[in-house]
Structure formats: C-alpha cells, structure tokens
Image: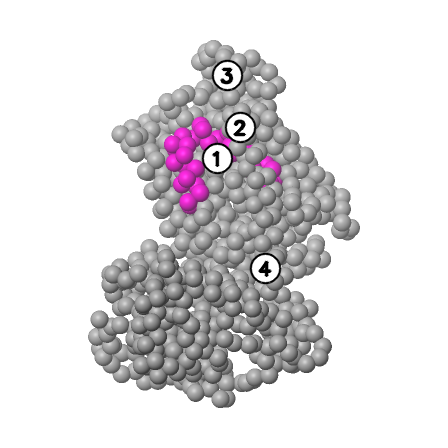
Amino acid sequence: MGADRHDAAEQGTVVTPSAEFPPLDDAERAALGRIGARWHGPRRADDLPVDPTPGRRAGRPAPTRFGRLTPIDMFTVAQPDELVATGAAHLPGNRFGRAVTRIRRTLVGPPLASSSVLYERMRKLVALPVLSSDLLSSVAYGPEAMLVVLVLAGSAALGLALPLAALLVVLMVAVGLSYRQTIPAYPHGAGSYIVAGDNLGRTPGLAAAAGLMLDYVLTVSVSVAAGVHAVTSALPGLTPWTVPLGVLVIGVLLAGNLRGVRTAGNIFVLPTYAFVVVVLAVLAVGYAKAAARGFAPVPPPAVPATEGLGLLLVLRAFSSGAVSMTGIEAVSNAVPAFRPTEWRNARTTLGWMVAMLVTLFAGLVGLIHLDGLVPRADETLLSQLGRVTFPSGPGYAILQVTTALILLLAANTAFNDFPRLLFFMARDGHAPRRFLHMGDRLAFSNGLVALALAAAGVFVAFGGHTERLIPLYAVGVFLAFTLSQTGMVVHWRRRPGPGRRRRLAVNAVGATLSGLVLVTAAVAKFTEGAWVVVVAVPLLVLLFRRIHRHYATLHRALALHPPPPGPSGPAGSAEGEELPQQVRHLVIVPVARLNRASLRALAYATSLGRPTLAVHIAPEEAEADRFREQWRAWGDHLRLETIVSPYRSVIGPLAHYLEALHSSRPELTLTVIVPEVVLRRRRHRLLHSRAEQRLRAALRALPGVVVTSVPVHVSH
C-alpha cells in the first residue's frame, strides 16, 4: 500500500492557495533559460529611480483627504527583493469599498493568512458531523421513500421492507468498504472524478464529476426542502413562506461555510450528534417495548392496493430506499480537509459513518415494521414513530427539532465537497480557473457561491416540494459510485502485490451492486424525473470538454518556445515578441480636445522615446479645421492625423483606423495612450459619458494593440 500511496501522491495535488499558480514543466523551463540568455535590457533594478524595497518608516499623523491619519505600514521586508503585504494592504482605498469589506468581515470573519491553511483542517470528531450530516439525515426520509412505493401494492407488500432493507445494508457495507480501500490509494483526494479519470479515462471521470455535481445541488435542494417541510408541519402558518424560508436557509448555510471549514464544522457539530443520540434513544425505547411483547409485530392498518406487486414496483422501492446512501462518498472527496495523517483520519471517519448509517437505517426499518406503521401524507414515518415511542413528555418535540435541524444542515456536506470537486476540475482545466481561488477564510468562495445559486434556483423552480425532487436524486450519485468502484477494479489489476485479489474483489462487488442500483433507478424513475439527470450528465460532460479545449488552446498560445537560432531581429508579428529588441512601437494618443488631461497624455507618450501620433475624430470638416488651428497654436510638436466622422461615431472609426495601421505593418505594436479623468465621487460619474472606458474596452479586442490610461484625478 505504501507504493500505491506514493503513486497517488504524484497524481494528486495538495489543496493550497498556491494551486492557482502551476509550475513550469521541464520543456518550458529550458525554453525560458534560452530566451533569457538572449535578453538585451536591464538585468537588475540598480538603475531604478526609486528603491523597490522600502524600509520601515516611522509613521506620523499627516493630513489626508480622510483627515489626519497615522500611516500604517502596508508591507514588511521578508528578505531582499521580497515584501509581505500586511492586513492593511488588503483594504480598499475608497470609502465604499471599505464599507463593503467591513460588512463582509462581519458576516464571514477577518481574513486568514495562507500559512493558516493547515489549521483550517478538521479533526475526526469535527469531520464526522460535517461530512456525515447528509448521509445520516437520509435515514429521516430514506426508509419512508422505500415504504411509500411498497404501500402502493397494499399493506401486505410492506412485508418486503425487511428483505429490501437487508439488501440495502449489504450495499451500504460493500460501498463503504470499497471507499475505505480507495482513500489510502488516493490520499490527496479519493473522489470519483479523480479515481475514474485516472483509471478509466477522461470521459468517465467527467461523467462521474457531472453526476456528483448534480447530486450535490440536489442534496442541498432536497435537504432544505425536507427541513422546511418539517418546520411547516409543526407551524402550518409558515406554509405560504416555504420558498422564501428555503432560500433563507441556503443563504445561512452559505454564510456559515464562507467562514471556513473549521468554523463551519464547529457550527454544525451539535445538531448532528444530537440527532444521532435522539434516534438511538427512539430505537432503544422502541425495541424495549417490542421486547416486552415478545417482538410480535403490530398489524398495520389496511391500505387498498393501487398497483400490482410486480418486479418494477419492487425495483422502484429498492432504488427509492437507496437514497439513504447519498453522501457516503463525502469523506473520499474531502480527504485533503482532514488533519494529518489525512488518509488515515478520513478512513477512520468513513468507518464510523457507515456503522452509524447501518445501525440507524436497519433499526428504523425494523422498528417501523414491528410497530405496524404505514406512510401517511400528513405526517412522516419518523414523526409517527416518535409519537408511538414517546407518547408523553418532551421526547417527541426533541426528535422533531433535531430532525428539522439535521435535514436543514445536511446540505452542509455538499457545501464542503462541491467546491473541492470544482477545485480538482479547475486544476485539470475542465472548469473555470476561478474555482482554484481561496477566499479570505481559506474556503473556496467561488465554488460555495456557485452551489448556493444553483441549489436556490432548483429549490425555487420545484417550489420547495420534496416529492418532486426525490426522483432526480439517486441517478447521479450512483453513477459516480459505479464509475469510482470500476476505476478501483482497474487500479488493482494494474498494481500487483499482496492482498490485490481481496481488494479487487471488494471493489468489484461494490461496482456491481452500485451499477445495478444505477440501472434500476434510471429505468424505474425515468418518467418521474430521472430523465433530467440522464440528459444533463452528457451535456455537462460536453461542457467540461469544451472548457478544457479552451484552456488547452490558451496554453498552447502562451507556452514558452526556444527562440530560433541566429540574431534576434524583429518579431514576425506583434504579440509574438519575447525579447525587448524585437518590439517595434508606434504610440498613438486619441485627443478629443486640448486640455490638461490630453496634454499630460501627450507628454507621457513623448517621454517614452518612441514615434508618437496624435489622432483626432471630428464630426465635421469645420471642427477638424478648428482643431488643427488649435494644434498649430500649441506648437505642432507631434504628427496629427484628423479623421472626419460624419455619423458622429468615435470608437468605430478609431478602431478601424488602428486595424488599418496594423494590417500595413503587422510587426508594429500600437500603444494607445488614452487620457482619462478620474472623479473622486461616484455620483459625479453619472454626469459624464465614460467614453474613455468604452474606448479601452473596444480597443483591447484588437490584435497588436496595447491600451494604457493616463489618469488625471479631480479631487472635488
């Protein structure tokens, strides 16, 4: 196993803030050295007009536009040529930005330094409730989902609940053991995306990722819908507010997770443990009462059959009960979130989770059978069981409160794993690179926000109704289960060693059982809504491949290549230069009128020591003549080109003019220097056309054009 872990360590990537900045490969490093050897220009900062590494200065109160303030050091000197930005350097420079920052820090807390990433990881007792809330909460609706289907064939069909539950327990244990083997083999992330992609290929890996992403979004939607339903069942007056309440809960979960993994874990520890303790108390009291009557089952009330008891109905019941397993993969996806030794702590936590799941699920199904309970539209089975077990006292109320809390917080598992999955996909170029970025609290803020928005959209679209969301639930996650375990079968076949056959057999059993549930769920629930997932998975895979194609094209365009032999002449085209001596400039200054802003831009352009051309766009010939006369009065220091635009457009004619210049001399770099007036007060900007910003945006799309702004700040 040690060799396997070493191999996986090379394939995985430790989750750190530096993951946004991948290293150069050997070929690029060699090309970089050859390019640098032919670089003709200043090699050091010795000729700079300012010291780039300022020392610490004593701060004295000084008048500023904000009053008399004592300067705060924005940087500290770590070593020669290296500064470290202090916390003050991260504050915006304007009042509005600072106000927004204060609000954000009030909600999510002060920023954490990158060096704190290790301390933001979870110990086992915190990771267990954080990662198991989804899995354990499913026992509140999983048994009922199975019985709701069986009761369609009448009360007699409820007798099949025990053998189906036994099969589901076998499935839980098999999949749990499979993931316990996967974690040590992939200690830097044992999620289905990594395992399937590494062993089965890119497309199966992307299919597993698509299934998991849909599952995470549905986990949040279903959990919040079930939790809100529990609340509105106890307080019917809140029923019209189901959708706003659900969106509010998703917002609270988002805010909690934006505070960081460790802080979010501390928030969600108590409700999860409380739910487990209360359900265990229900089981203990319920089975004690059953033992007192010799474990004789109470006959269930007669329910007329509306469907025949056929194979399809049994398969539907089995796949519905399998939703109790959603979330079992959470630990394998979150291995990097554990404290060292990560894989060992993750494997132990997974073992605890599976043991608790089997105990609660099997115990509840058995007790429901012994008490003769049947599903009802107006009350959940767990609520009925609580009333029977605790006919008096606060026990029933405590059960309902903890159930509502665990259902509402079950979505937290998805908030932990969804951003991490996006991180690994973005690392491989299959998702936008922004998902690599860690926020102020060392959480993947962009991934968290994306999950919250997607889940809120699904919740609103389905009106917060749990029964409409459940049919979509199992297909995606069991697709990921199947591909992951199949990938591990291939993994063990490629790696001979002691215990290989046993490990291969365990994963093969897990893959087979997961595949059967996948096919069953897809077929039995296809018309009930599973078709949405069946269609969405290939569409997402196509999207991921398109994103990867874009990043691959971008990488090829920006990759370093050795320069051709011989002297370094001009580059074949603009944007192809890699050496200073290859760059050929033409500086262009658009001038609307002669004032302090335009003269400063002209002065800046001239100071660069490159050929400079001024361009004026006039709406008619008379204006062109007037501007040329003003230009001569200034002294005619630079070449002026006047363009008459009879349709009064400025940006279009200027852009086409630059394109014409670039076409005539493709090797030229056209440096466009735009005068810009910067106003202090935001409300004053509404009084101006902001033509400079629109001009910059239009010119940046042109090849061979570099746009630079020369600002003039107006303080009042």
Precedes in sequence: disc 1 or disc 4 = 1
The disc placed on residue 320 is 2
Which is in the foreground here, disc 1 or disc 3? 3
Contact? badges 2 and 1 (CB < 8 Å): no
* Three-letter code for the amino acid on which mark 2 is drawn: Ser
Residue at the spot of label 1: 138
Where residue 294 appears, as percent x and y from the top left, is 50, 20
Q: Is residue 701 above or below residue 356?
A: below
Q: Which residue is mark 3?
A: 152
Question: Which is in the foreground here, disc 3 or disc 4?
Answer: 4
How far apart are the alpha carbons under marks 3 and 4? Answer: 56 Å
- The prevailing secondary structure element of the residues shown in magenta is helix
The answer to whether mark 1 and mark 4 are in CB contact below 8 A is no
Amino acid type indicated by mark 4: Leu
Q: Which residues are magenta?
A: 452-481
Q: Look at label 1 and name its amino acid.
A: Ser
**Residue labelled with disc 4:** 554
Q: Residues within 10 Å of mark 4 (few under 14, many from 20)?
A: few
Q: Secondary structure at mark 3?
A: helix
Q: Please say if the residues under marks 3 and 4 sit with CB atoms less than 8 Å apart.
A: no
CA–CA distance in space, label 2 to label 1: 11 Å
